[in-house]
Image (tube, rainbow, N blue to C red):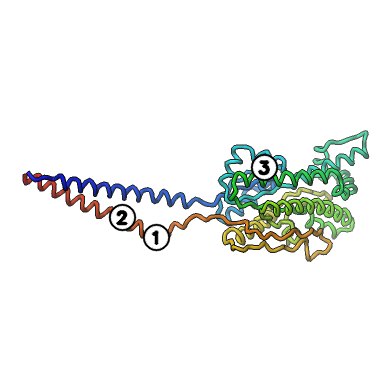
Amino acid sequence: MKSTNGKGGLVKKLLGVAVSAALFLCLMPMAGAQSEQGISYVALGDSISSGYGLEEGTLSFAQRVAQDNGLELTNLAQDGETATSLLDKLQTDQVSAAVAQADIMTITVGGNDLMNALYAYLTDAYNQRNPENPTTQEDMKNAVMGGDMGVLTFALEVGPGFSNSERATQALADFHTHLTQIVLNIRAENPQVQLVVVEQYNPYSYLVKELSKNPIFASSAQSLCAAFGAGVADINDVIAAVAQQQECAVAKVYDAFETAQENPCNASVSIPVKLDLDFHPNAYGHGLIAQQVTELLAQQVIVPPEDAVVEDQPQGDVSNPAAPQRPTPPVQTQDVFQVQQPPATGDTSDLVIWMILVCITGACLVVVTILQNRRKGDKHES
């Protein structure tokens, strides 16, 4: 009987090679699947990010940014969010985990910080004038947002003093502290995340243009716009300062709303005379915000030049000299956006390796089959 030990050992070796190659081929699609994971986009902030006030089916700016740029959105925004509450939220497990995995993040915050301080200021002023019939901050808020003409008249009278008030000064100081800590906490959790802070806007700029056509409302409308413009400018100055210090980008929404071709907010006036002071952006406004963020990403994330410089944008409405103007923040020269794109799945070298392994596997299997057939023949002869 002929010995088959040599052939048997060779068969085992060839089988081992074939199995190893087959396993490698099986694992390659898994690696490809991992490389195909999209870019993670986390939206944090207030009702601007959550899409409050939009009709059902209308995309918020965060959803538009995700859709336009092929990003995977996790929206953790909450109506009424302030810098204080957002700072607390970053300590929760859900938000902390999302931040750790994010490639891109946007933050909309500051509006509620400003409005809460304004309502407190108006409440203080009202109660000083009406000590026998005091009101609460919540009632003041409801009256203003509900269009109570008596309260609105009072608010327009005392509103111009808000920007120099103790309430405003403290609110801005707190906002600066909390926004700085928010960015630091995010950086500590995820040093590589690309962070965009969205500017605040004056929700009544366009409305004032319409009201100014009526001499009855012209003066009050301009006072309303000026009062909000001053507060928004202060908030945006804080955002610009923190962004420069912490090297994150700013979406220039203020200018986009000032030069809007139609009303970007829900604020409106109807007949009979009723003012709706809802400061949330409408669908058109969300489109403007999305455009600013997307343009920023296109310039600095998708194709980031090594020596990228963020060009300064014109401040205020250049077509309207009377529109509130803001100081020009220092130009950012840091290349703050460098998102790592997933490897291309159609790489030629990967295809060549795959084809070679297929050929090796096939050859091994053919040789194994031939040797096994010979062994059967040898046994039959013996």
Pick out the residue farthest to the top.
Answer: 132
Say which residue appears at 93% left-offset and 33% top-offset: 132
The answer to which of marks 2 and 1 sits earlier in the sequence is 1
Judged left or right of residue 327, residue 6 is left
Residue beneath label 2, please?
A: 358
Label 3 sits on what residue type?
Answer: Gln
Q: Earlier in the sequence, mark 2 or mark 3?
A: 3
Judging from the image, what secondary structure is the residue with disc 1 in?
helix
Outermost front residue: 6
Residue 134 is at least partly visible in this image: yes
Q: Which residue is mark 1?
A: 349
Q: Secondary structure at mark 3?
A: loop
Quadrant containing the N terminus is: top left
x, y (%) of residue 212? 85, 58
295 or 99: nearer the viewer? 99
Q: Position of residue 18 (x, y in %)?
A: 27, 49
